[in-house]
Amino acid sequence: MIVLSLFNGMSTGHTALDNVGIKVDKYYSSEIKPAAIKLTQHHYPDTIQLGDVTKWKEWDIDWKSVDMVLSGSPCQDLSVAGTSAGKRLGLEGSRSSLFWVFVDILNYIKELNPNVLFLQENVGSSNTKDVGIMSRALGVYPVRINSSIVTAQLRDRYYWSNIKTTKDGLFDDIRTNIPQPKDKKIMLNDILISGYTIKDKHSCLNTSSGTWNNTNQESLIHRNNTTGMITLIKENDGYVRTVNKVEMCRLQGFPDDWCDILTITQAGSLLGDGWTLPIIEHIFSYIKESK
């Protein structure tokens, strides 16, 4: 396949395709974060970096040859975690409005290759109005999958895709028809290198996850008590900590050493912004069926 990955992050799409046995002939990446580009080129040196997604009309691509478009457009304006629900700007926000750039690119490719596949992901806390707008723009309604089914973290997400669809309802709405994956029953204590926690699942990783590890004990406990958004792990000596780099990789389904070349802050940012690898593998496992 020839793949165009927008907001590429750490190239989870490439890894998932490899892992389900689909050959990637060419992989275009649109990304601007230096750490993300560094990690991608480390694992996939043949990746073609395109830069800023808003400058897509300047890209030198054989557009009609693109087989699949991937997009995890920024979710900060859609997410409850990103800001208070009352202040969410939704698809009108400066970051989440980049969704419309993805739509423009996808529609342009569709004119040249009507059979192009696509995958768009966004947060499960998006309000129903925004989900409806995105669904109508893409011509398909999403499937909602929580990463807790296949990993030790809570990560509720919508996935829009034409890889596998069905018609549904009175008006034959087209819906993404990816079934829920089999529950692997992985608990948080199962993936810890040391220590223990009273939580069954990790609170959803986010872009600041790696920064918490440098917080002193008092402020770390205070943050946990006031926000409830972090997971404390207690060591046998009484020291408390948050997840380390290896454990964050495990929470997203990656090998332990996947982010070795990054600092823990960089790894936390990319993993927190990224896709859950086993979920994307599950979705991509239906590609051969769609051909």
Image (cartoon, grey):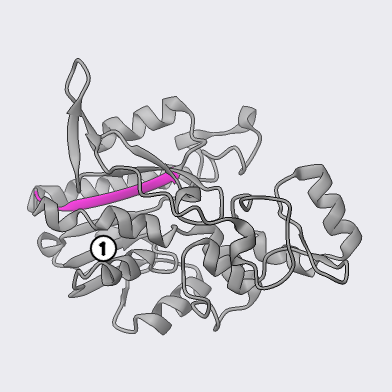
User: Does residue 123 appear anywhere in the picture?
Assistant: yes
> Residue at horizontal 25%, vertical 66%?
20
Q: Is residue 166 left or right of residue 217?
A: left
**Residue type marked 1:** Leu
Image quadrant holding the C terminus, namely: bottom left
| Nearer the observer, 8 or 52 | 8
Q: Is residue 143 left or right of residue 233?
A: left
Residue 104 placement (x, y as % from top left): 26, 46
- At a point 59% along the width and 50% down the height, the residue shown is 204
234 sits left or right of 70 in the view? right
The secondary structure making up most of the magenta span is strand
Task: Give the quadrant of the N terminus.
Answer: bottom left
In the rendered image, the vertical position of residue 198 relative to residue 65, given as above or below: above
What residue sits right under mark 1 in the picture?
Answer: 4
Q: Residue furthest top?
A: 170
Image: 257 above or below 19? below
Q: Residue at x 81, y 51 (%)?
A: 223
- Mark 1: few/some/many CA within 10 Å (<14, 14-19, 20+): many
What's the magenta region? 115-122
Depicted 266 relative to depicted 257: above or below: above
Residue at (59% x, 73% y) in the render: 246
Residue 133 falls within the magenta-colored stretch:
no
Return the x and y of residue 131 as percentages of the image width and height.
Answer: 39, 32
Residue 225 coordinates in the image, percent (x, y): 83, 45
Q: Nearer the viewer, residue 50 or 35?
A: 35
Q: Is residue 54 shown to the viewer in this render?
A: no
Residue 5 image position (x, y, % from top left): 31, 62
